[in-house]
Amino acid sequence: MFSIAAIHTIPAAAQADPDQTLPQVTVSASRFESDAAPIGATVITAGQIREAGINNVNEAIRKIGGVFGRQNYSGTSDYSLDLRGFGTNSEQNIAIFVDGIRISENELQPAMLSSIPVESVERIEIVRGGSSVLYGDGATGGTIQIITKRGATQGTHGSVVAAVGNRGQEELRASLNKGWDGFSFDANLGSLRTDNYRDNNELRQDNFSGGLQWASADTRVGFRVEAAREDFGLPGSLTYDEYRDDPRQTNTPYDKGTLDSDRYTLYGEKKLGQLQLAADLSYREKTSTSSYTYGTAPASRSRMESTVTQFSPRLRYTSAFSGVTNEFVAGMDFQNADRKTKSDYSNADGSQESIALYLRDEVRFSKARIAFGVRHERFDQDFSDPLSFSFSEYDRSFSLNAWDLQGSYDLTSIINLFAKVGRSYRVANIDEYTFSPNNEPLTPQRSNDAELGASFGNKDHKLTARVFRHDLRDEIFYDPTIPNVNGFGGLGANVNLDPTRRQGLEIEASTRITSDVTMSAVLQHVSAKFRSGPNDGKEMVLVPKNIATFRMNWLPGNGQSADVGLQWVDSQRYGSDFTNTCSARIPSFVTLDARYAKRIGAWELAVSGTNLTDRDYFTQAFGCRSSIYPDPGRTVRFTARMDF
């Protein structure tokens, strides 16, 4: 996969006024804030998000971070994100966190990044490659950390945003922040209404998030609440002939879905000299419903209720001697996830409990860093379904281990070399182990990971290049061709694949052409193949070998700004073509987006568009020239924003 997109690596080349002094960006390389970036990381700042006119967190990760995304099925902005070519299961190979709380949960659904107010984001950290030591299950492709603005300055600040666009787009967002005497409070509201591109793909989405925090020089405690409500149509898939005739049509005009999610988080930190203690406690409850109509038969209805509880205590001890700094981190992760399904075809009840211990030590010299970490995690899974057509229950326990060794060296003031090796893992989530052949348990996925890279330049001109390899055993993947009595039409199940490999090259670049103009790019090439078994040497499905995205930003400092982006995505195998025998491939495509804004006092007026050439294309298709989910056509919106 070749991916070139607007990307800014540490130190970030912000597109601010050249006379403006930027605050120092803190990052969380060890689950504690630090001024040392994770080795080989990409950091997106709030300033970059604002200057690019980004409307949501998922869009920021794709456009500024250069991460490939696929349109989801419900019409929200929660594209499935893909680091390093993991195809349709890409979301299950990325661990996504908000303020240390995992939101990529134990289900086959993309993380609900659309529920995070973009105005509340301080920065986004993208770490590519295996990261299971600190973050556990599902971090083979990498991790994405969203850090929100906590601890506002004195006084009251906020913004109001209103937007309208084609296909019935109407959006309102409002944010308020207040700080006083060590306390800080924030509240964020969002409401979106849109018909979306396809028939029966209308979306109604409402979000709220808010929090209260108290902080002193050595203590911080706070509480947050997040809520999301969604109602949407489900347009379903098309054959290739249907897509070519009219990609906006639907064969399922009455299929609908809803989603309600609430999360409550309590967090705290305490510094005791060289020792720092921290803990996060989070509880999430979610209810989703769906209704599917088949011909003249009564609608088939489903209701899923799930809860997730997380508790993560940890400590950090730092010391220094003769110019050498040592950072030792130890922590535990507790998680309990449960889901109950009530439908015409299932009364499934599944749960997973896990407990993990991790240790990590990093030594920093004047020009070098070296870190080593280990993790041990125990899982308990159980499942039962009295309505299943086959094996209907099990209860099992197992343990997994991860490790990694990382290092970097400053060859000169503008050249940094870095390397990583380690092992990561992934466990089948509740959707996967309840939809396997005969509902039998799936073996955990394991990956041996390696990366070698170099970074050149400064904040105005920077280039980062990496080569990487992931050798996987028992990769967990959906195979739509395998017989399964519980599958649709008797086919389709989640399985353990024969050994596979992802290897490739990533190049990120940014440059300031003039004081007003910056250009950036991310280039990614991935070779994803089977490395043994009947399909030895065959390409993996739904993985574009190359992606290229370029962006240019104009910020003259007179209240005007403009941003233009171009992305090319290579062709890829259809989702059922494990044998590489389908005579066709998902076609390659190019998309163009742009934005122009003018600031007048406290107001900013903007016009923006995506897929401006109105290109017909698709990134999800699970059969050979069939089961196609078209991506959106041209979208244009007008936005007004007021800051106070």
Image (cartoon, grey):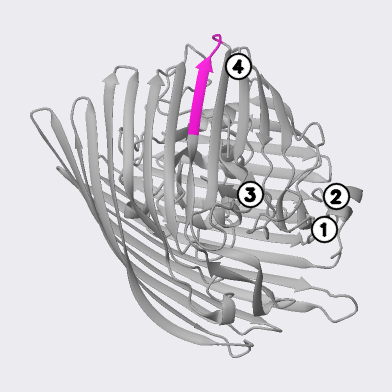
Is label 1 in a helix, a strand or a loop? loop
Q: Earlier in the sequence, mark 3 or mark 2?
A: 3
Q: Earlier in the sequence, mark 1 or mark 4?
A: 1
Is label 2 in a helix, a strand or a loop? loop
Q: CA distance from mark 3 to mark 4?
A: 28 Å
Residue type at the position of mark 4: Leu
Is label 4 in a helix, a strand or a loop? loop
Q: CA distance from mark 2 to mark 4?
A: 37 Å
- Quick check: can you spot residue 152? no
Foreground of the two, 246 or 49: 246
Q: Please state the horizontal and vertical placement of residue 154, each as a whole percent of the image.
A: 41, 34
Whether residues under marks 1 and 2 lie with C-beta atoms below 8 angstroms apart, the answer is: yes
Q: Which residue is mark 1?
A: 238
Quick check: 167 above or below 382? above
Whether residues under marks 3 and 4 lie with C-beta atoms below 8 angstroms apart, the answer is: no
Q: Which residue is mark 4?
A: 555
Q: Please state the horizontal and vertical placement of residue 55, each as a whole percent of the image.
A: 64, 39
